[in-house]
Image (cartoon, helix red, strand yellow):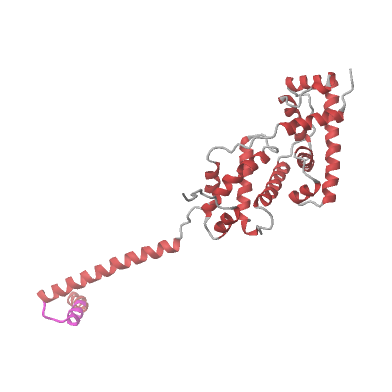
Amino acid sequence: MSKMNLAHLKKKLLAAAKAHGPSDRVPFAFERRVMARLTPAPSVDLMAWWGRALWRSAGACVAICLLLGVWSALSMNRTSTASLSEDLEHTILASMDETDSTW
Amino acid sequence: MPDCAHTEPTDTELIAAVLKGDTPSFEPLVARYSPRLFATARRYARRESEVEDIVQEIWAKAFQKLNSFRGDAPFEHWLMRMAVHTCYDFLRAHQRNREATFTELGEPERDWLGQFVTDPDHASEHADAARQLVARILEELAPASRLVITLLEIEDRTVKEISQLTGWSVPLVKVRAFRARAEMKKCLAKLAQDKYL
């Protein structure tokens, strides 16, 4: 049995590696996967979201205040000739008047 | 009739656009150079999933470090340096126990070796078995040895080119090449020994 010539074997095997270079095939949609990895997902800015919510609710609050103001002004004109300050005084003192009568 | 041939943007133009914030301009670069990167990665990894991971990693690093590309060498050279570094990192991360013997050779590989023993000149380099044998031997080498043998002996690069690709000094490349050849000789001797046992 002849001795294996290692130098010749190495030369043959390296020639085999050179003769069959690896494929340069690119998998389908590879570029899209790379770009998806590189493009960051949009992050949620909590402070911006909170600010937007506050502005929206401020508008609604102002509208409610205006409506209530109009309603109270209209109801005041119909039911009482007293001014707003007199009505407020009557309301606050009403509870004290009731307290006097129970004692 | 005017010449309406569409000229593709150059690497420099695409890189400038990406650095200004136009990320989609990176895609033509990916399409242009991925074939070369896949061919390179397939020299160091067997499984397609690993090959794709390596190439994705190369592109991710290239994108992150794009602002360090100075333009004094072609983009392809800069990218290939990154590719070699990434492949080397992969080899080091996936180092196996290199005590494996060659007793688990497949029949085509044993037949090819048998033919080489009886008639070395007629053992074909184009045989699939020869290619599988050399891949098996390269897997047995240390990462640095495998890298040097691949670049030096298979891709026929010069020591200077290997130094530029790896970042190793020229003397270090020479020392590693010497050790790699000795290691490969040892693997081949083991292969011959296992064959005859």
Q: Position of residue A95 (x, y in %)?
A: 21, 75
Indicate left or right for B37 with B14 as reference.
right
Q: With respect to residue B17, does A86 lie above or below? A: below
Secondary structure mostly taken by the magenta-highlighted segment of the chain: helix
Is residue A41 in sight in this rendering? yes
Q: Which residues are magenta?
A: A80-91
Indicate left or right for B34 with B186 as reference.
left
Please report the residue visible at 83 percent of the width from the left and 22 percent of the height from the top.
Answer: B120
Quadrant for the C terminus of chain B, please: top right
Please report the residue visible at 13 percent of the width from the left and 81 percent of the height from the top.
Answer: A82
Asked whether B100 or A53 is in front, the reply is: B100
Please report the residue visible at 10 percent of the width from the left and 74 percent of the height from the top.
Answer: A78
Q: Position of residue A4 (x, y in %)?
A: 87, 24
Asked whether A31 or A40 is in front, the reply is: A31
The magenta stretch spans residue A101: no
Q: With respect to residue A89, does A44 lie above or below? A: above
The magenta stretch spans residue A83: yes
